[in-house]
Amino acid sequence: MDTVQKMVSGFALDLGPLKEPLGFIRVLEWVFTIFAFATTGGYLGKSHFTVNCPGAKEPVDATAEFGYPFRLPANPYYIPTCNGGPANETFLQGDFSSSAEFFVCVGVFGFLYCTATLILYLGYQNIYRQTARGPIIDLVVTAAFAFLWLVSSSAWGKGLTDVKWATNPEHLVEICSDVCKPGEFPSMGRLNASVIFGFLNLILWAGNCWFIYKETPFHKDPLPPATMDKEGPLGPSHITEGP
């Protein structure tokens, strides 16, 4: 209880850090991190093709649904048969959940860290700069997140390429190429944006390391240039008067 009271009493809102690169870039990280995991999680797409049976009046649609976390075999889809029998149950191939979930996990934890540090910057700036420990920990964690964004964005970019191939209608109709025709390609704009936001986060978090580094004792300001005496570099001149 005493600790909570001390934290509340020590809170002093100061929006000044938002005008500095340290706070402004952290806000950008907060926004782009939300965009990164929000455009991946909750995605739902459909891939469809048509079955043109000989003698049928109209083609029949076959639709395969898929979405986050992209365990494609989890949701079956059905291909109509031309002999009047029951539809064939079929599954999409490929499990790309590891790269997608890793990417979203990095985004969620990055969002939480940005929120915590923004509270620290704006409400407890005196505590943050009181000792060297705060900026050093901030630098290490920010550098770690920059590395995680590099790894997760690269992995998810490769995973997204595989998802596109596995859900491509031209690939799906290979099992019934004699009577099937591919339909429209599923909309992937949202997922493409997620990869872009991932690499933008990499740039932001890596670039912010420099401004956090300047807050640490490892960064030393250059010595000010030596000032020359107003009376000249050799000091005041002494003129001796003759007798």
Image (tube, grey):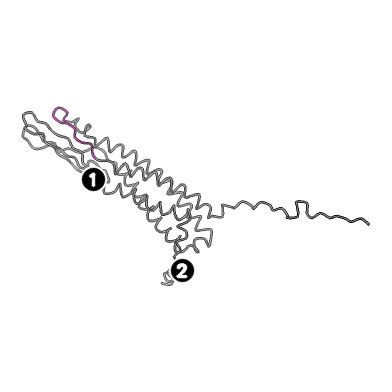
Q: Could you tell whether 215 is left or right of 30 in the image? A: right
Place of residue 196 in the rendered image (x, y in percent of width and height, measured from the top left) = 36, 43
Q: Amino acid at mark 2?
A: Gly
| Residue 177 is one of the magenta-drawn residues | yes
Q: Position of residue 104 (x, y in %)?
A: 33, 48
Q: Which comes sooner in the sequence, label 2 or label 1?
A: 2
Secondary element at tag 1: strand
- Residue at the (26%, 49%) spot, across then down: 42
Q: Is residue 12 left or right of residue 109?
A: right
Name which residue lies at 42% across and 61% down. 119
Main SS of the magenta segment? loop
Q: Is residue 118 magenta?
A: no
Write down the region rendered in magenta: 176-186
Amino acid type at image mark 1: Leu
In the picture, the disc for residue 241 is none
Q: Residue at x 64, y 53 (%)?
A: 224
For label 2, the residue is 10
The answer to which of 167 and 2 lies nearer the viewer is 167
Residue 73 in percent (x, y) is at 22, 41
Residue under circle 1? 44
Q: Give above or below for 223 relative to 131.
A: above
Closest to the observer: 22 or 115?
22
